[in-house]
Structure formats: C-alpha cells, structure tokens
Amino acid sequence: MKALCWHGKNDIRYETVPDPEIEDPRDAIINVSSCAICGSDLHLFHHFMPSMKSGDIVGHEFMGEVMEVGSEVKHLKVGDRVVVPFTITCGECDQCRRGNFSLCERSNRNKAMADKVFGHAGAGLFGYSHLTGGYAGGQAEYVRVPFADETHIQVPDTLTDEQVLFLGDIFPTGWQAAVQCDIEPTDTVVIWGAGPVGQFCVRSAVLLGAKQVIVIDNVPERLSMAQAGGAIPLNFDEESVLGRLNDLTHGKGPEKCIDAVGLESHVPRSPDSMYDRVKQSLWMENDRAHVLREMIYVCRPGGVLSIPGVYSGLVDKIPMGQLMNKALSVRSGQTHVRRWTDDLVRRIDEGQIDPSFVITHSVGLDEGPEMYNIFRNKQDGCVKVVLKP
Amino acid sequence: MNRSHSYMSHSLHGSDRLARGLGWFSIGLGLYKMLAPRKLTEPLGMEGFEPMVRACGAREIACGVGALSTNPSLALWSRVGGDAMDLAALAAALRDKHNPKKENVGVALAAVGAITALDLVCASRIKKRYAYQAGPTPDYSDRSGFPRPAEAMRGTAGDFETPRDMRAALPSPAKSPGERVTPTTRSPNG
Ligand SMILES: NC(=O)c1ccc[n+]([C@@H]2O[C@H](COP(=O)([O-])OP(=O)(O)OC[C@H]3O[C@@H](n4cnc5c(N)ncnc54)[C@H](O)[C@@H]3O)[C@@H](O)[C@H]2O)c1
Ligand SMILES: [Zn+2]
Ligand SMILES: [Zn+2]
C-alpha cells in the first residue's frame, strides 16, 4: 500500500510499504477514505518528538471503512464506516473506566520504555513515535486499529467525511480544552493559537456559553476564521497581548486561558522567544514555552490554564512563583477522544456545528509530503489539510 | 497543481539537500579554520591573520548549525554575507604587493567564488520555499462552522454539564461580586 513515512527532520515521503495485517484478535483493519495533517504532525516533521524511526508511517487523524476484523471483535463488522480516535483505548483498565482514555494503561505496547521517561506513561497513539507504542499511522491506504471494539467512533452515513473526520482529534481536543475551563457565563476565555485546534476551542467556548472569547495569533486569515466563529481577534504582531487583554477585562485579566500552540510558539521580537530558540537548537531545552509564560502572567488570579498544546520534554524559565501565588489551576493532556464523541456526533448531526469549515486544502495522499511544507509555512492560506488516499 | 508527481511526494527538495550539504560543509570548514588556521594562512601568504581566520571559523560553524535547522533560510543568507567578507579579505591579499603567494590566493578566490554562487542559489531557492505566509491571504470571514451567526450560538451547548473531574479547582473568580462562598465549617462531631 501507499503511505506517508517519516525519514528525519523535514523529511516525509510518499512510499510503498507492506499492507497491515491483523496481529491480535481484537484488531481491525480500516480502509482509509480520508485523513488529515495535524499540528502535532509538525512536531514530528521538525523532529521535536523523540523515538521516531526512519520509515515510521505517520498520521493520527483518519477514518474509513472496516475491511477486516479479528476473531474477538464484537461491535464492528466489515463495511462499517468509522472515525478512529488518535488515542488507542482498551476500555477496560482503571483509567479507561474513568473516561481518561488518553491514559489507557494497556494500549501502549512500549510502556516499559515510556514509563522510564514519564514515570508512568499514557496510552498508545497512532503514528506518534515509539514512546507512544510505535503504531503505524493513518496517512496511509490501510491501518491496523488495535482494541478496535473501543477504538472507533460510529458515524451516521448521512454525514460526509469532511463533517466527521475531525471527531478523531481536533474537534474533541478543542472541546476538551474548553470543558477543562469549566466555563461560566461570566467568563472571558482566551485562546493562544488560531490553528485548527484553536478554531475548535473558539467554537467550543462559544457553544459552552463564555461571555467573551479572544483568540491570539499573527496569521491574518486564521484570525479572520476565528472571528467568524465568534472570537475577538488579537494579532500579537500588531498589539500588546497584555494591554489588549486588560482592556477587554476591565484590568482584571481573563479567567480562563487555553494554550493551543504547544512547543513551537514563535514570537519574532520577544527576547524570551529568541532565548528559547537558541536553547532549543543547542538541545539545552526541548520546548519553547513563550505561551505558557504569557498565560501565567496575564491570567486572572484563581483562573484556569487549559493546555491542549503538545509539549515534549523539558522547558525553561517557567514562572512558578506567579503560578503558585496566583493560585492558578493547570489542566492538560492528550484528548480523551471517546469520552466526548457521542455527544459531539449528536451536535454535528443536529446541525449545531459543521466542522468542515476548517478545511482549506483537500488533495491526494501523494501530495501529502509537500502539504507538510505548505501547512508548516502557512502558505496559500492553509489552515487544515485533508488527504485522500 | 501542475507540479510533477515526484516533486510532490518528497517533502525534501533538491534545495533542501543542498542546504544540508552546505551546512555540514560549513561546520567542517569552520572546525578546520578554528583548529588549524595556520594551514590556511601560510599557503595564502597571510601569516598573522590567524585570529581573523579563527573568528571566520566560528561564524562558519554557527551558519552550519543554522543551515541544518528546521528553517535554514537565515543561516544561508548569513553564509552569503560571510562569503562576501572572505572574498574581500582574499581580494585584499591579492592586491598586497608583498604577498609572495598570489597564485594560491587566486585559486582560493575562485573556489570561494564558486561556493558563493552555490550559497546564493541555495539561499534564494530556500527563501522562496520557506517564505512564511507566502501566497494569497484568503478571506475566511464566512467560515464560521455555525448554522446561525456566532452570537446566536452562544451557550447552545447549555445542556452540557462539566464533569466533576473537570470543574475549576477554585470557585470561579468570574462572578464578580458573585456568589459568596462560605468557609468550610467544622462538622458538628469535631
Ligand atoms: N492535546 C491533544 O490531544 C492535541 C490534539 C491535537 C493537537 N494538539 C496540539 O495543539 C497544538 C496546535 O495544533 P494545531 O493543529 O492548531 O497547529 P498549528 O501549528 O496549525 O497552530 C498553531 C498556531 O499557533 C500560532 N502561534 C505560534 N506562536 C504563537 C504565540 N506565541 N501566540 C499565539 N499564537 C501563536 C501559529 O501561528 C499557529 O497558527 C499543537 O501543539 C498540537 O500538537 C494537541
Ligand atoms: Zn493531532
Ligand atoms: Zn485502557
């Protein structure tokens, strides 16, 4: 089959690889009809995630038709149309029972190695390094889905691929980021990053009834898309983040802050950003933490920091004194996708939201490698890329 | 899109590979200049210029590391700038009446000239490929994702209740002055 494979920094290739096979009786094989490139894939593209191996198949946002099922799969049959959550979940372990699906204790088959790094590791993920199980990803024609009975989302045939594909990752990610803020009708919610995840944070915060939603970025078309969804745009190239946020909150600061940027924040003229770049390129820290610092600083005391943005390891100069003295709560994590998706399928089906608004590019899988460049450089108005195998 | 198939199916293009080659070359040459500057100054008749050669070496190494990074653009233009400095220094050596090794200087000038051309070609190609936000800035102001104006959608998911494990740890500071939270009282049994 054809798939997109990782071969090192900036190096993704469209290649022929062996077809996946059922390896465990609980597996299913999916024939991918649509997949997408996620901001998280850019962290792989830039080689910020450790434990990638040359030839690894990437991609964790995908959907398609069930082609084959293992002997112990009960709730899926050949021909079913499913979206696959990027977090692989067994559904039976302590964490899965609590709905903490991204912390599944069984699905990471490299758990021993990951435990050494994390103390105690989380779930297996598709196409996201060997620390998360080394599972082949979904930017491919076919994918093996482990624990298939639990690791799938059934979707109605009346909805198109474009409407449901993002249930596997970025829609529930934006939703969980907003839910973790425990939004009240008097809240101001600020979202750093107007990428695909930030866009869904905006819509989720609006649906959940925030008084005011503000989005920060410097890419004009992403800001205008966020504004369309009900956010007040703040371009950090043109105005002061602190000043504008204080203006909008009567000098008190926002109650709820969401980091939808992650480890590659870029602010061309800020000294801490330059410091991070130098340290990161010399392997003295893993992640650039400008957004974390800014959130901690601007947040109203007693507020919540919700962090869906991905971080990989060590960061430097985190103002713990501000965080502690302001009594801020921090909530983070990979998304517990399945926890939210039944509710979100209903909301799409009822017409509350149509997630396809975010798609700006839809091309064949063979053009995927070049789309990584275009998405990364935000060229051509690119916000979200869908690939068709 | 009318780009050829093979062009699209690799994210690394020829110019990226060239940038990497120049990056490693830059690091190698930089180390050589730092560690053995006399091996360059002697054959060029430029004895006494070792500290300058060492400084150039440091510059080459920095540019090399940059050229191997996720965005090599700036490092490649810095290399072009460095090349210009090297060319100027060599041209001065060529004009120096007392330099006994002008032939070697001529050869070095030609070599640096060739590298400069390569750096220039690479830098300008990479600049185009990595141009941040290049291309049109489309108008996405109609992409709300909502069936009605965003204002009308506010609170539509009012039926959703935050799960217990995701409630804010502190009473919301938002409800100013808000509900008064009473301090927890001691239970009657102590
Ligand atoms: N927790 C999860 O389960 C989960 C799931 C999906 C994605 N993610 C993560 O969410 C993050 C965003 O993903 P995406 O797909 O939207 O990626 P993206 O790269 O398209 O978006 C990031 C946006 O942040 C902006 N940005 C950069 N620096 C900024 C700054 N200092 N202030 C404000 N904005 C800034 C960029 O211009 C860009 O528009 C990534 O880190 C990704 O890995 C997490
Ligand atoms: Zn993702
Ligand atoms: Zn589990």
Image: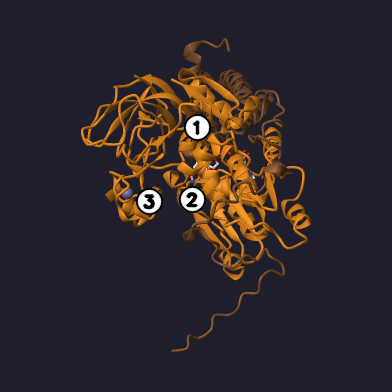
Chain colours: A orange, B brown
- The residue carrying pointer 3 sits among few (fewer than 14), some (14 to 19) or many (20 or more) residues within 10 Å by Cα, namely many
Local SS, label 2: loop
Cα–Cα span, label 1 and label 2: 40 Å
Q: Position of residue B52 (x, y in %)?
A: 61, 39
**Disc 2: CA contacts within 10 A as few (<14), some (14-19) or many (>=20):** some
Real-space Cα separation, disc 2 to disc 3, in angstroms: 28 Å
Q: Quadrant of residue B71?
A: top right
The image's mark for residue A103 is 3
Q: Quadrant of residue A229?
A: top right
The residue carrying mark 2 has its beta carbon less than 8 Å from ligand 1:
no
Q: Amino acid at mark 2?
A: Met
Is A86 situated left or right of A377 in this image? Answer: left
Q: Position of residue A266 (x, y in %)?
A: 62, 43
Residue A338 picture location, percent across and down = 42, 44
Report the mark closest to the observer, 1 or 3.
1
- Look at mark 1 in the image and give the residue it sits on: A164
Mark 1 crowdedness (10 Å alpha carbons): few <14, some 14-19, many ≥20: many
Q: Quadrant of the C terminus of chain A?
A: top left
Task: Tell me whether the residue at label 1 lies in contact with that at label 2, contact meaning CB atoms closer than 8 angstroms.
Answer: no
* Circle 1: residue type: Val
B67 left or right of A250 in image? left
Q: Are marks 1 and 3 on the same chain?
A: yes
Disc 3 is placed on an element classified as: helix
Residue in the foreground of this view, choosing between A110 and A164: A164
Mark sitting on residue A284: 2
Q: Is mark 3 within 8 Å of ligand 3?
A: yes
Where B165 sits versus A70, above or below?
below
- The tag on residue A357 is none
